């Protein structure tokens, strides 16, 4: 996978559930945060897009959980992206930092809602053309 | 306490942390949801207030944790409210349903931000005048 | 789809993000809660399973987001399940209650970790044999 | 205030609600994470304490919300602590990093539950004796 962005985070205890591992929904939070940080690193703010009437929304997400993260684990979210028709497809994988073990493989398909209708975002398209 | 509203909810497993009890931050969620349901029951929508430029915001919250809630517990959020100067003071207590044991005592002080400045909400004031 | 269980919930404002719609990760919470409620309705407690050394864990999840839920929307989580080899496959769909519109289609593949290794749960298997 | 520990974090978009600011319950998450990081920095693991039968639990929390944090804001959680009788009292304040503005003042009173009863933790007491 040709990753173009990564961020490293650390598990917070409140993200763990009574099994002592990160609750699955938090991985989705990690992936979302990683996508937004990627966009920010390219000069695109999710909040500003929203104020301008453009809302990137996730149409489909699939996640394979390989190795659970525990309290205090550090992990790296790596990201690749390509455009397929009207969709932006993000490939997002999470690795445990201590041993680089794969924790999660995710595929996130996003589309743009522009003023309430399916559309395209020039800002996002330019971003992808550069990479 | 002269409660004027109550809702009953049930603990969801994802709200429990690795101690097997509800993570404290979720009580704040419960209290927020109970306040919004109270407002809705009186015809006031938090989301609509926001769209009209009025944002009730919490200025101060204090919570005493008496008995922890566990997975699957049902509980009732009871609410009283009074106005003190510019503040709306909500007294919000949570009782475990199985034995009516007090789980949490909360006091939430809210103020209204109207178009970006401290202000008052006629809708909220009329509401309190009626009770 | 041959649904065998359903629960109805209501969007809580704190589940909505700055786009004014339910944050995607919360759908995963809804699906998890619906699965646990299904198990409970058949006499199986997720927390008790954990204490007995059996942890059902999600190996893979895919969700298609069809229609966003907004503040105050009521919705129904419907569930079907079948066993495929060692996996329990849950088909979980969410419908908006006001107009029965499909909001989310989810497929959740779970496996059992018994005392730290992949295994099977007699309790879960008997459950599926009955349905 | 004589702060003895601090961590710097960044607002994640999913922590913001439909008002566009950090949902209040997340501040409680920040404070919890900051306390646990403080303990870890002194060699005490919250998860390990739990496994040894000692659970520090919050008995009372009060938070004054001074300035809301927005999407992407960086902020520093500063912490002081003292022992009062059986209680550990944490003074936790959050400052916006860009201008050092006070965002939140918090006081968190914790007690130790040791094997199910109120007790004391030697590890925590030694920690405080040193500071």
Image (cartoon, coloured by chain):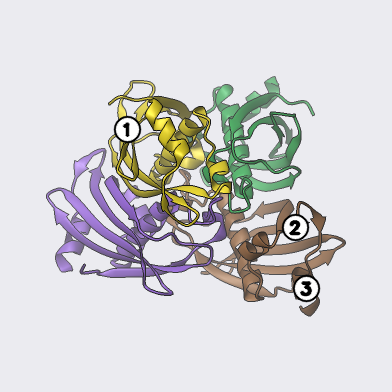
Chain colours: A green, B purple, C brown, D yellow
Task: Name the residue that disc number 1 marks.
Answer: D103
Helix, strand or loop for disc 1: strand
Q: Is residue D131 left or right of residue B61?
A: right
Percent position of residue B91, x then y: 25, 59
Q: Are marks 1 and 2 on the same chain?
A: no
Identify the mark at residue C82; answer none if there is no mark.
Answer: none
From this view, report whether residue B50 is shown above or below residue D36: below
Residue at 36%, 26% in the rendered image: D96
Whether residues under marks 1 and 2 lie with C-beta atoms below 8 angstroms apart, the answer is: no
Which residue is farthest bottom? C130
Few, some or many residues within 10 Å of mark 1 (<14, 14–19, 20+): many
* Image quadrant containing the C terminus of chain C: bottom right
Q: How many marks?
A: 3
Q: Is residue A51 visible?
A: no
Task: Name the residue that disc number 3 marks.
Answer: C128
Whether residues under marks 3 and 2 lie with C-beta atoms below 8 angstroms apart, the answer is: no
From this view, report whether residue D84 is shown above or below residue A99: below
Which residue is farthest left? B85
Q: CA distance from mark 1 to mark 2?
A: 42 Å
Q: Nearer the viewer, residue C48 or A109?
A: C48
Helix, strand or loop for disc 2: strand
**Residue D95, quarter of picture:** top left
- Point out the tag, 3 or 2, that comes first from the N-terminus: 2
What chain letter is assigned to the residue under label 3?
C
What chain letter is assigned to the residue under label 1?
D
Identify the mark at residue C110; answer none if there is no mark.
Answer: 2
Few, some or many residues within 10 Å of mark 3 (<14, 14–19, 20+): few
Q: Is residue C62 left or right of residue A47?
A: right
Q: CA distance from mark 3 to mark 2?
A: 13 Å
Q: CA distance from mark 1 to mark 3?
A: 52 Å
């Amino acid at each position: 996978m040709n990753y173009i962005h990564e961020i490293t985070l650390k598990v917070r205890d409140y993200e763990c559930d009574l099994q002592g591992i990160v609750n699955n929904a938090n991985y989705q939070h990690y992936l979302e945060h990683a996508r937004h940080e990627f966009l920010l690193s390219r000069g695109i703010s999710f909040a500003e897009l929203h104020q301008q009437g453009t809302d990137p929304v996730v149409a489909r997400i699939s996640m394979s959980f390989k190795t659970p993260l525990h309290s205090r684990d550090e992990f790296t979210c790596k990201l690749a992206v390509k455009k397929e028709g009207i969709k932006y497809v993000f490939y997002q994988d999470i690795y445990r930092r201590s041993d680089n073990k794969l924790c999660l493989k995710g595929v996130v398909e996003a589309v743009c809602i522009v003023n309430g209708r399916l559309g395209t975002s020039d800002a996002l398209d330019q971003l992808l053309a550069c990479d």
